[in-house]
Image (cartoon, rainbow, N blue to C red):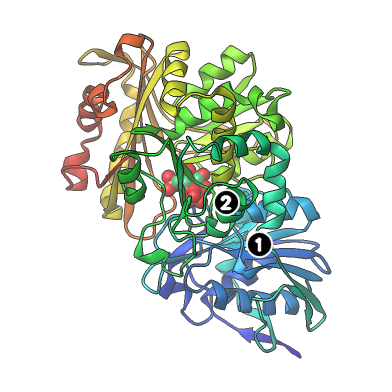
Amino acid sequence: MVSKTIQTQPFTDQKPGTSGLRKKVSVFQKPHYLENFVQSIFDSLQGYQGQTLVLGGDGRYYNRQAIQTILKMAAANGFGRVLVGQGGILSTPATSAIIRKYGTFGGIILSASHNPGGPDGDFGIKYNIDNGGPAPEKVTEAMYQRSKEIDSYKILEAPDVNLDTLGKFNIGDMAVEVIDSVADYAELMQSLFDFDRIRELVTNGQFRMCIDSLHAVTGPYAHNIFEERLGAPQGTVTNGTPLEDFGGGHPDPNLVYAHDLVEILFGENAPDFGAASDGDGDRNMILGRRFFVTPSDSLAILAANAKLVPGYSSGLAGIARSMPTSQAADRVAKHLGIESYETPTGWKFFGNLLDAGRATLCGEESFGTGSNHIREKDGLWAVLFWLNILAVRQQSVEQIVTEHWQTYGRNYYSRHDYEEVDSDRANNLITSLRAIAPNLKGKRYGSYEVEYGDDFSYTDPIDGSISQKQGVRIGFTDGSRIVFRLSGTGTQGATLRLYLESYEPDPAKQNLDPQQALAELITIADEIAQIRALTGMDKPTVIT
Ligand code: G16
């Protein structure tokens, strides 16, 4: 087999966003596009000769082709071994778990997460480092810089390999192992949670649940864990076969895109528990019977109940949340007497805190929750955590959440997304907010008074790195907040995200619809940012 060096031209748009490089499939299919970026990844790394790489993806369209290309490039670039998921399938959390378990050099995950798939959908590629977590900003920045000057890449001339059968073989001098996509991950879950107790709950004939994999990567994991290992009835997992186009759906577990599940949980004779996960398995949505748990509340509730779960029974070191996530978890941290951390959006910012043992649980409003067991957020882990709590407390989801509010107060929370906004308009809006925000202190809007306005900047407490311009925050004297930022994961125009939060300590006022509770703040946000005028849109496209 011959290693070839192929001449190429740089592309100017290979800047990784919040989580890797995401583009339309048609962009990745351009000659040399994928290869350039993969070579830029390799060129930004040091010391990988002879080392092991983990490789897999969420099964979306172009996954298999990309894996064949990356295997041949890894061989030509001198990797010693690649562990690749059977059928090219590895969820993001499973990849993180495998990197850590086998101490590999790093891993490549092919996914555009919750973005739609198929030939007209999105594709993506992200690199994870040896702690199992997303490459930090300095590494992704080096990849981007390299991508702007790259003039050649290396690839082995070799036939495609069989990804569907477990086994070991060689491509050139490089070993390839096709591994079981599920086993290592499922064993890790079994080591953290009380499977016996959960089994009792899900097989008692009373408790009913529905796990929707949205035809994305978690199907095989969910069948194995919930139906095989925990004995839940067959059919508990729905849409459990990963499809290249996710069955035409949008694999994003929220109230809008996981609508089939929402209809079941809010319908007649609804089950007790429902959950969905996203394209690559790192996000989760938790539902009770006619009850939605916001991701921000979910983080706070997992933290408050962590003692009930074997893997966390010795206590938490700290809790970290992304800045736009509600402050509900901070209240639990305070109560527990542990540190809470506020980081920019992006799971990569939790990595240092987890590695240093400063945080045990982390969470984001964008349906992401996780812990120090790996270095990614973890959808099925969150589902198991909830089931473990339900099994011990023998209460409904709604009872657990409302009792939590009674103890800690309720942080009403909502996110309004304005998708596919013209990029220039969206940038103008944020630029003018950056200018306005610092001057708002003391200003009154209806019943609210501004306490501070700023553009969030984060100094990593471990390595001192500084990340600026992470979102415009406007905080009010009663603890309410409005946050504005542009998404770093979209592929079409810009997505403006407006995050709204208010705090209600009085149990008698905790059962409002969040849109109603936040109505005044929603109006104030538009008054300050001129959203309707500047985006040209009169309402958000998605409300969660
Ligand atoms: C990614 C990141 C998350 C982030 C989310 C939304 O999630 O890993 O940390 O919260 O995007 O980011 P944005 O608001 O910039 O679109 P995923 O599940 O897409 O990998």
Examine the image and state in which quarter residue 63 appears: bottom right
Residue 119 placed where, x, y %?
A: 40, 74
Rendered residue at 41%/51% (across/down) = 252
What's the mark number on residue 315? none
Amino acid under disc 2: Glu
Amino acid under disc 1: Ser
Q: Examine the rendered structure and indicate whether residue 355 appears above or below residue 212.
A: above
Tell me the SS state at disc 1.
loop
Residue on which the image places disc 2: 227
Residue 186 placed where, x, y %?
A: 67, 50
Residue on which the image places disc 1: 181
* Depth check, front residue: 256 or 205: 205
Q: Is residue 314 left or right of residue 198?
A: right
> Dot 1: few (<14), some (14–19), or many (≥20) neighbours within 10 Å?
many
**Residue 325 visible in rendering:** no
Tell me the SS state at disc 2.
helix
Labels 1 & 2 near each other (Cβ < 8 A)? no
Examine the image and state in which quarter residue 172 appears: bottom right
Number of disc labels: 2
Q: Examine the rendered structure and indicate whether residue 125 appears above or below residue 120.
A: above
Quadrant where the image shows the C terminus = top left
> Dot 2: few (<14), some (14–19), or many (≥20) neighbours within 10 Å?
some
Earlier residue among tags 1 and 2: 1
Residue 495 placed where, x, y %?
A: 33, 49
**Residue 56 visible in rendering:** yes
Examine the image and state in which quarter residue 342 appears: top right
Residue 260 placed where, x, y %?
A: 33, 51
Mark 1 → mark 2, Cα distance in angstroms: 17 Å
Furthest-front residue in view?
Answer: 205
Rendered residue at 52%/25% (across/down) = 301
Question: Is disc 1's CB within 8 Å of ligand 1?
Answer: no
Rendered residue at 41%/28% (across/down) = 454
